Amino acid sequence: TIFVTIIPYNNAGSAMGCTEESFNTETSPDCTSLASPLNGDTGVALDTNLTWNAITNATGYFLTVGTNAGGNDIIDNQDVGNVTTFDLPNDFNEDSIIFITVTPYNAAGNAMGCAEESFTTETIPDCTSLLNPINTTVGVIISTGLIWNSVNNATGYILSVGTNTGGNDIIDNLDLGNVTTYNFPDDLEENTTIFVTITPYNAIGNAIGCSEESFTTEIISTIPSCTNLLDPLDGSINVAVDTDIIWDAIDNATGYILTIGTTSGGSDITNNQDVGDDTSFILNEALPENTTIFVTIIPYNELGTAEGCSEESFTTEIIENNTKFGFSPDGDGINEFWEIHKIEDYPNNVVSIFNRWGDIVFRIKGYDNNQNVFRGDANQLTKIGAGRLPEGTYFFQIDIPEENNLNLSKGFLVIKR
């Protein structure tokens, strides 16, 4: 405080009783503090500006910024003038503690003892995890949506969803923005394991090494739908008499009932036979030639059988010179081998016998109805178990190089034991 007395005078003398006056000289300013980011903040953006509180009697500010306490490797005591904000020329480094000292000043001097403040810059975000459905949950409803935990420094999330591990056939690396839920546009498949990867991100980058999670959807039980013939196809003609019956698999079927007949609605070949969950059927005997075969296949599961399944049909081949023969090699001395009438008149013959799958099981040259005959034992494929042939229908082929009146080249042969 400065005290001043001013006394005017002239030849008559000095002024009397003049009052003393006073004034206070200026002081150095007080210290300031960060307004943004605040002291102690974390996850601060790398491109953030510094802002501090204004000091009334300050005419300017000195700024020091460093990456360690007392450091000045970023800004070294720079006079920034009478402003309260500063845009650094370069962004901060990620995951760094930044130390700031702002020193107000005026003509009287600098603020004294101003405290250093600090904040921590942002890093790439941590990974998140599913909240709903929780990882490994089973029986999840097919209309479910996804919910996951929020990550503090994330500014968005990338979603991938698939039906196999690492897959993206449902959602492919979709940037959802800064949300923590997702609703699928369509219901998920039932009884399917769904694999989910959620990757948080921010301006620094994507979270690293986020684990894939999964859940399994519910099983919705319904009566199965009908199936269709795959082989032979409905309406096929010239189908081999030794064909197998094959049909389309139905996902929720646990078995099939098969009916086969030679008339529409007939069951003279197979009558309502439960074949289990197979999708093919091997007939015990060859089908009759040049015949329309009618087939009905009814899928079923624990809830019931398919309804309204259509009968399908195909027509078997015509076998030239088809004759059906039989013999009974049962040891009773009667009809023990296959006798081919007049075959001995053509000694250059070759007789071949095939099983129902077309594998040759017997072949002989010079069939003579005496020593060289077929007694129901294989002489081909013996190393893989042909041996003594089981009873059933076989196919034969007789090859004679010269002109002949045998009038027999191929047909069926039945073994009865």
Image (spheres, rainbow, N blue to C red):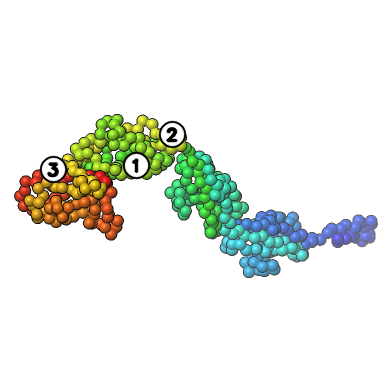
Residue at image location 23% in from the left, 46% down from the top: 328
Q: CA distance from mark 3 to mark 1?
A: 35 Å
For residue 259, which numbered disc appears in the image? none
In front here: 264 or 378? 378
In front here: 353 or 77? 353
The residue under label 3 is: 321
The disc labelled 1 sits on which kind of residue?
Answer: Asp
Q: Is residue 92 in sight in this rendering?
A: no
The disc labelled 2 sits on which kind of residue?
Answer: Gly
Residue at image location 62% in from the left, 57% down from the top: 43
> Label 2: few (<14), some or many (≥20) within 10 Å?
few
Q: Describe the element under mark 1 as helix, strand or loop.
A: loop
Tell me whether the residue at label 3 lies in contact with that at label 1, contact meaning CB atoms closer than 8 angstroms. Answer: no
For residue 274, side relative to residue 50 (left or right): left
Number of marks drawn: 3
**Residue 1's quadrant in the figure?**
bottom right
Residue at image location 32% in from the left, 43% down from the top: 281
Tell me whether the residue at label 2 lies in contact with that at label 1, contact meaning CB atoms closer than 8 angstroms. Answer: no
For residue 304, which numbered disc appears in the image? 2
In front here: 30 or 34? 34
Q: CA distance from mark 3 to mark 2?
A: 47 Å
For residue 248, which numbered disc appears in the image? 1
Q: Describe the element under mark 2 as helix, strand or loop.
A: strand
For residue 415, side relative to residue 40 (left or right): left
